[in-house]
Image (cartoon, rainbow, N blue to C red):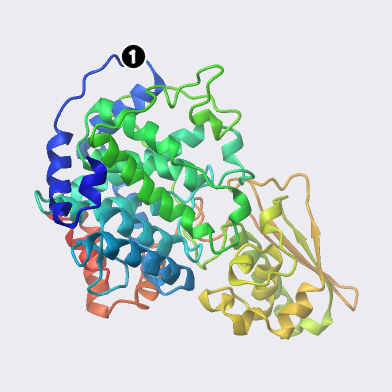
């Protein structure tokens, strides 16, 4: 059924109608009521808009706005253009000109729901500019593109309200956080799987299942199917392929929910710890799951307990500690000597956590530079800041940057652990005259312990969105997101993003 519907141009609207009808059917089965997987499905199925507290609503709308902004500027990148051409070729060979889901920054272009979710997910992570949580993952980008595409797909039969969209988004975020909380390994900067490719796929499936109004058993199958579509190795960090992790999480989670709606079934114990048969535990060796409490007005979402980190420049989150520390020590240098003079530096000591994939002495691409403690520290020292332009070739390969990189020494203090809740960045300048100056950062501005103000968040969004949208469009997006509960047709939001 799914194959026929998706690959036949004439049946695109029929797909929406079919899913809407199948979503209201109750799938019977012999599910055990006390399993972890069943509790997650019950949470997805049972969560209602009134279960979201004011804090959760406020924080999640900030996440949505920020994610849209980084997606819009991400739609101007090389990696996005590669993926967009692929999606267009694939779409038009199957559908011709019939489609209805918007693509960030592409006025007049429409794609199928899953391809739009894929392209927009890649845009979100193309510059590593999207939000980060603890345990470490990028939660918004895996969920938002999927449910925005779904809102447009469903709009041919019914209007998806802003309340529904916000609820589905929070379901997708919560599922990711709960799954990661079952593993101590997940709390540290990852070594094996890129987390959004794992929990992000599950979150996308959960959010999509919620928006599709799937029954509890169908939610179980959506999660189980998503688990079979999840996972990407950390070796592809700092390459063009890394943004595919977010794009695939969004797309494949949506596909899992659609497949479940069409009757596809999978292991009903996928989230349980079954001895001798790995389910979700395949991704985390120390996985110890617990049943999720039933949703209700007394349920406390993880987002209420801990805010999200927003980035002020497009690079791996760890770079924000070291950049702030470098700016701090530069300021001390200027206070003492009047101006910053790199030629007076004998050596630069970086005290950072052990994390191989972000320890890159001489990055030779923008993606490696976004994952290099050394590059970001030296850029902050030289320019007094790191911003979007820092990763352009004319700045990356300056002689002055190379000279500073050659002076860097890396140390790994035992108390500086690879954990976004505990790590710090420290930069020490050993000067040729014998002086030593040190700057340290344990909480950068934008971290969940030091959240961005509304003014700062809007400044970032307006700057990012301005690469694609006009001023009145930008203000329209801000107004719609900040007043999402009053929006009667959320499919209008993605229409504004092109």
- Does residue 464 appear to the left or right of 385 in the view shown? left
Residue 455 visible (yes or no): no
Could you say which is closer to the camera, residue 84 or residue 326?
84
| Circle 1 residue | 32
Q: Position of residue 48 (x, y in %)?
A: 21, 36
Q: Quadrant of the N terminus?
A: top left
Q: Is residue 216 above or below residue 400?
A: above
For the point 65% across and 49% down, which residue is it? Answer: 423
Could you say which is closer to the camera, residue 158 or residue 493?
158
Q: Is residue 409 above or below residue 450?
A: below
For the point 53% across and 58% down, which residue is it? Answer: 242
Residue 407 visible (yes or no): yes
Q: How many marks?
A: 1
For the point 41% across and 67% down, which residue is it? Answer: 456
- Does residue 480 appear to the left or right of 310 in the view shown? left
Judging from the image, what secondary structure is the residue with disc 1 in? loop
Q: Position of residue 184 (x, y in %)?
A: 59, 33
Q: Quadrant of the C terminus?
A: bottom left
Q: Determine the image quadrant of residue 468.
A: bottom left
Q: Position of residue 60 (x, y in %)?
A: 33, 50
Could you say which is closer to the camera, residue 125 or residue 256?
256
Tag 1: Cα neighbours inside 10 Å, few (<14), some, or many (≥20)?
A: few
- Does residue 14 appear to the left or right of 444 in the view shown? left
Q: Position of residue 470 (x, y in %)?
A: 27, 80
- Does residue 410 appear to the left or right of 140 in the view shown? right
């Amino acid at each position: 059924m799914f194959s026929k519907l998706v690959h036949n141009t004439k049946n695109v609207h029929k797909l929406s109608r079919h899913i809407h009808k199948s979503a209201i059917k109750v799938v019977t089965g012999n599910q055990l009521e006390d399993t972890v997987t069943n509790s997650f499905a019950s949470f997805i199925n049972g969560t209602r808009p009134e279960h979201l507290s004011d804090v959760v609503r406020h924080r999640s709308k900030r996440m949505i706005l920020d994610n849209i902004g980084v997606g819009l500027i991400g739609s101007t990148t090389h990696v996005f253009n590669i993926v967009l051409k692929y999606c267009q070729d694939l779409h038009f060979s199957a559908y011709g000109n019939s489609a209805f889901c918007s693509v960030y920054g592409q006025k007049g272009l429409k794609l199928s729901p899953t391809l739009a979710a894929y392209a927009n997910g890649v845009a979100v992570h193309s510059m590593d500019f999207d939000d980060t949580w603890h345990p470490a993952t990028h939660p918004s980008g895996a969920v938002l593109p999927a449910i925005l595409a779904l809102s447009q797909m469903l709009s041919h039969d019914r209007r998806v309200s802003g309340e529904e969209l916000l609820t589905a988004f929070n379901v997708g975020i919560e599922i990711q956080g709960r799954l990661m909380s079952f593993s101590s390994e997940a709390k540290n900067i990852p070594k094996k799987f890129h987390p959004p490719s794992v929990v992000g796929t599950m979150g996308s499936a959960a959010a999509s299942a919620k928006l599709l109004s799937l029954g509890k058993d169908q939610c179980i199958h959506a999660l189980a199917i998503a688990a079979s579509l999840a996972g990407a190795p950390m070796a592809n960090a700092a390459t063009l392929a890394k943004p595919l992790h977010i794009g695939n999480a969004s797309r494949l989670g949506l596909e899992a929910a659609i497949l479940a709606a069409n009757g596809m079934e999978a292991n009903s114990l996928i989230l349980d710890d079954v001895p001798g048969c790995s389910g979700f535990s395949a991704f985390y060796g120390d996985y110890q799951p617990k049943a999720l409490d039933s949703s209700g007005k007394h349920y406390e979402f993880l987002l209420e307990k801990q805010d999200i980190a927003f980035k002020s420049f497009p690079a791996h989150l760890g770079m924000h500690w070291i950049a702030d520390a470098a700016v701090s020590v530069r300021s001390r240098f200027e206070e003492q000597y009047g101006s910053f003079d790199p030629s007076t530096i004998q050596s630069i000591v970086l005290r950072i956590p052990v994390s191989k994939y972000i320890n890159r002495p001489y990055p030779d691409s923008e993606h490696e530079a976004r994952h290099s403690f050394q590059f970001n520290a030296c850029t902050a020292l030289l320019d007094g800041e790191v911003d979007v332009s820092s990763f352009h070739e004319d700045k990356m390969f300056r002689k002055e940057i190379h000279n500073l990189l050659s002076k860097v020494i890396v140390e790994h203090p035992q108390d500086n652990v690879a954990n976004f809740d505990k790590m710090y960045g420290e930069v020490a300048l050993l000067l040729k005259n014998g002086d030593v100056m040190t700057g340290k950062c344990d909480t950068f501005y934008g971290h969940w312990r030091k959240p961005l103000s509304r003014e700062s968040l809007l400044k970032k969004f307006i700057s990012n969105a301005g690469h694609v949208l006009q001023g009145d469009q930008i203000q329209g997006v801000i107004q719609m997101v900040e007043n999402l509960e009053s929006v009667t047709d959320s499919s209008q939001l993605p229409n504004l993003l092109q």
